[in-house]
Image: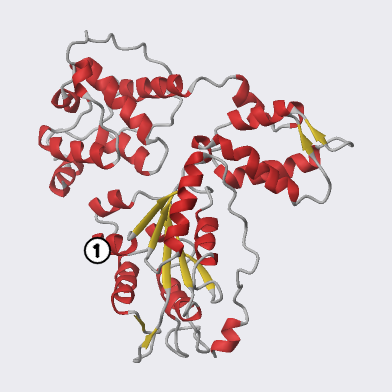
């Protein structure tokens, strides 16, 4: 049974190379090599497309388990019941459609490495099953009464903020600490622009014909924000291979319009953040929005970054002259949520130094501009006398 199942398993014989050129990625690679020397569990975080799977494969290939299997499972691509069967296997007749025994990916990775991608998308029930396996090292196939010991190293990855999911009751705190023995964070491509040319050159090197990108075109590529990160860069390079001229050269005119348009109107990062902070501030102060109901979900869904939250807080502190309690009133946060708000800022490194605003004069609010960010709609107005259940539930949860 194991042999038949293993025949469909892809062994990572020639994994994608991990290209590093920036200081941030060199430091990350050093930590990854140290992580590869042991068997501790690793949690890799970062935005979609930054290469978390490549880093996980790199750790496996540099570990003592390199001769064994490296098995990857996308936890977001399967329903709860299918994910349980995929991980732990099942026996014939255990559920409708189980016509034969199936070996789970955990057993297939015995002696090697199991990579759990998008682990933050697991249901609470699956989290409990995974936690039980991590604690005793035993698997029990669906529909079976027997268990089996396995020796597997776990590497997990997510693009979600797991501490926030823990506080929201959507991710088990004990599982979080089990997985985060070693934490590696892969920065987005826009924060390591020194890697853009090196990674792009690696994609070009695998092309079927030689291609040359001019310096001006490289500069335009390096100015772009790359919301899709390395995955988007790979797609753009593949497009350029088809757009290149007969002599194989690529200039700025050959770049996709989205890149050249962004480059021509690109503002300094500090100015962009200040503008977005002003838009969020106006939505809170004059637009009827509140922090927990509207701004916080944008951060959780990664529509805005910790830098945007920090700039928003600075904007509020400039008005309240350094008073965080005054910021609560501005942002529509109940006074009893002061500790929760401060803990949120501290956890995500969004706090601003209030002392620099103590002696400053109050800012004149900026003129209202059409927001560049799609904000969620305001809730329908409540009928007179109808209790505000959403706010009651939010305060009860805090």
Q: Is residue 144 left or right of residue 135?
A: right
Q: Which residue is mark 1?
A: 174
| Place of residue 63 in the rendered image (x, y in percent of width and height, measured from the top left) | 49, 68
Check disc 1 and report its element: helix, strand or loop. helix
Q: Using the image as rendered, state which of residue 186 and residue 127 is in the foreground.
A: 186
| Place of residue 294 in the rendered image (x, y in percent of width and height, measured from the top left) | 31, 35
For the image, the number of numbered tags is 1
Residue that extends furthest to the right in the rendered view of this protein? 246
Q: Using the image as rendered, state which of residue 397 and residue 277 is in the foreground.
A: 277
Classify 176 as above or below 88: above
Classify 63 as above or below 8: above
Asked whether residue 118 appears in the rendered view, the answer is no
Q: Is residue 42 left or right of residue 396?
A: right
The N terminus: image quadrant: bottom right
| Place of residue 29 in the rendered image (x, y in percent of width and height, measured from the top left) | 49, 51
Q: Is residue 124 left or right of residue 398?
A: right
Q: Is residue 242 left or right of residue 336?
A: right
Quadrant of the image occupied by residue 355: top left
């Amino acid at each position: 049974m194991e042999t038949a199942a293993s025949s469909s398993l892809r062994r990572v014989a020639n994994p994608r190379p991990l290209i590093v050129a920036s200081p941030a990625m060199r430091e990350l690679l050093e930590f990854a090599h140290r992580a590869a020397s042991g068997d501790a569990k690793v949690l890799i975080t970062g935005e979609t497309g930054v290469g978390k799977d490549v880093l996980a494969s790199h750790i496996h290939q540099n570990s003592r388990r390199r001769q064994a299997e490296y098995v990857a499972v996308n936890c977001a691509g399967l329903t709860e019941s299918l994910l349980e069967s995929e991980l732990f296997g099942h026996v014939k007749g255990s559920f409708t459609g189980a016509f034969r025994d199936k070996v789970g990916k955990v057993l297939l990775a015995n002696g090697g490495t199991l990579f759990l991608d998008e682990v933050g998308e697991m249901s609470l029930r699956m989290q409990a099953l995974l936690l039980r396996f991590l604690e005793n090292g035993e698997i029990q196939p669906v529909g079976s009464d027997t268990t089996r010991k396995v020796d597997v190293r776990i590497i997990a990855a997510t693009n979600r903020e797991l501490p926030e999911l823990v506080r929201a009751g959507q991710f088990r705190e004990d599982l979080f600490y089990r997985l985060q023995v070693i934490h590696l964070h892969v920065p987005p491509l826009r924060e390591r622009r020194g890697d853009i040319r090196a990674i792009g050159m690696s994609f070009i090197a695998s092309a079927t014909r030689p291609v040359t990108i001019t310096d001006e075109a490289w500069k335009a590529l390096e100015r772009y924000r790359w919301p899709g990160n390395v995955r988007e860069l790979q797609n753009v390079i593949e497009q350029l291979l088809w757009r290149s001229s007969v002599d194989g050269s690529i200039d700025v005119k050959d770049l996709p319009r989205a890149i050249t348009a962004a480059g021509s109107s690109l503002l300094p990062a500090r100015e962009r953040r200040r503008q977005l902070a002003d838009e969020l501030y106006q939505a809170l102060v004059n637009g009827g929005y509140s922090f927990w109901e509207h701004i916080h979900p944008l951060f959780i869904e990664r529509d805005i970054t910790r830098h945007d939250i920090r700039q928003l807080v600075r904007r509020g502190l400039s008005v309240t002259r350094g008073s965080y309690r005054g910021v609560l009133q501005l942002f529509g946060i109940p006074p009893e949520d002061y500790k929760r708000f401060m803990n949120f800022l501290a956890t995500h490194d969004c706090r601003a130094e209030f002392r620099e605003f103590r002696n400053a004069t109050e800012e004149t609010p900026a003129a209202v501009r059409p927001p560049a960010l799609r904000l969620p709609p305001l809730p329908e107005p409540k009928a007179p006398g109808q209790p505000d259940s959403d706010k009651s539930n939010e305060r009860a949860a805090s």
